[in-house]
Amino acid sequence: MNIHEYQAKEVLKSYGVKIQEGIVADTPEGALEAAKKLNAETGTSWYVLKAQIHAGGRGKGKVKETDSNGVVLAKSLEDVPEKAKNILGGTLVTIQTGPEGKKVNKILVAQDVYYPGNSEPKEYYLSILLDRATGSNVIMASTEGGVDIEHVAETTPEKIIKEWIDPRIGLQGFQARKVAFKLGLEGNAHKEMVKFITALYRAYDATDSSQFEINPVLKTSDDQILAVDAKVNLDDSALYRQKNLADLRDLEEEDPLEVEAGKSGLNYVKLDGNVGCMVNGAGLAMATMDMIKLVGGEPANFLDVGGGANAQTVEAGFRIILQDPNVKAILINVFGGIVRCDRIANGVVEAYKSIGDINVPIIVRLQGTNAEEGAKIIDESGLKVQSAITLKEAAEKVQAVLAQG
């Protein structure tokens, strides 16, 4: 589960990670009040306004309606309302949102931390994530902060520092010092970076996160180490024991169909194709999508109804798939192991009758326990549903439907 920057920073701060202070707002007037409060608390006289969406590249992104960047600098209190107005309510398009962009409902009004001092501010990159290949957590760091880490890894891989952490014993002091040393830090900046890394790992571990990405981490002109940005991804499977973090979920940032599917207990991911899929089991779903591509189609979704599928889950799956206007055919591919094929067939018939007026061709491929009985139920239903037993037969019927347009 992704959370917003302002939420991520509050989580980090609660574990002792130093952050760029900020206050969230959802109106231009609220942004001005936030700026005034920030001025009183931190003394800052310049203010960074940041669009809060679940996507990176906000600084380079553009708001469609105003051509404003997603991250802007206001050099006085008077500038804040107008600059906030140019972002709030607009559609921000970044390299990660795609051309459709995302609506900006909130902005973070943050303090300016690039103030003059004894030395030049310096940006670094730091992240913690799970390395599934080694079964360890890994700290990734680089002196090239503030830019896309993928570009750094491709062009100058030697600038990527990696330190693997055994999750059974956690981060050791020498490992944090090693990362700080490899970043070229000395004196108080080195000590502050060690503290920063230690607190960051503690937060990562305690929140059951799958990824922390801080880009940039800033060494200020007086050698403070701050998180200027924060991307936190929480492990969905651990949210049952992170009740306070589960409440941070922003449904407005998620695909409405995926939200609806989640309420019905379905695993659904929307794709860009023309053939809707309803399958029981993730592995079978992947094989089904491969088969659709082989016959010239494109999967419109990933939809796993699970092993305990019934008429209610099948109907919910139908309704979700049919909301996608790109769907030209639906393929239901079920292996009857835990659930019998005749039960699925009855569920399909009941769901079809309940929804009514379905103009999209439906192919139901049943294999396993009571597969023949299931096919008979489909064929004798009198509905515009085609049955299939083998994967080849299902593929041929999908291909024929697509050829008819």
Image (cartoon, grey):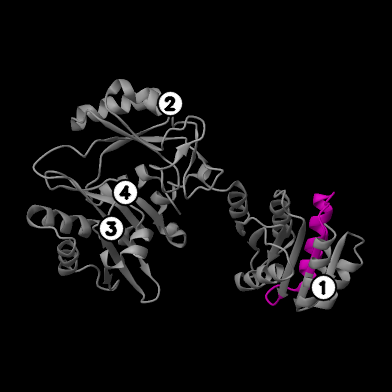
Nearer the viewer's eye, disc 2 or disc 1?
A: 2
Say which residue label 3 marks. 126
Task: Work out which residue is located at the far top of the displayed protein and give it.
Answer: 78
Image position, residue 254 (x, y; %): 53, 47
Q: Which mark is residue 11?
A: 4
Q: Earlier in the sequence, mark 4 or mark 2?
A: 4
How far apart are the two marked residues, 3 and 4, measured between alpha carbons? 17 Å
Nearer the viewer's eye, disc 3 or disc 4?
A: 3
Q: Which mark is residue 388?
A: 1
Image position, residue 181 (x, y; %): 14, 63
* Quarter location, residue 41: top left
Bin the neighbour count of mark 3 within 10 Å (Cα to Cα): few under 14, some 14-19, many 20 and up: many
- Image check: 327 left or right of 57? right
Tell me if I can see residue 10 in this picture: yes
Check disc 4 and give the amino acid type: Val
Tell me if I can see residue 307 in this picture: no
Question: Quick one: 402 or 14, which is closer to the camera?
Answer: 402
Check disc 1 and give the amino acid type: Ala
Q: Which residues are magenta?
A: 336-364
Q: Earlier in the sequence, mark 1 or mark 4?
A: 4
Image position, residue 69 (x, y; %): 41, 36
Check disc 2 and give the amino acid type: Lys
* Quarter location, residue 83: top left
Dot 4: element: helix
- Image check: 311 left or right of 267? right
Nearer the viewer's eye, disc 4 or disc 2?
A: 2
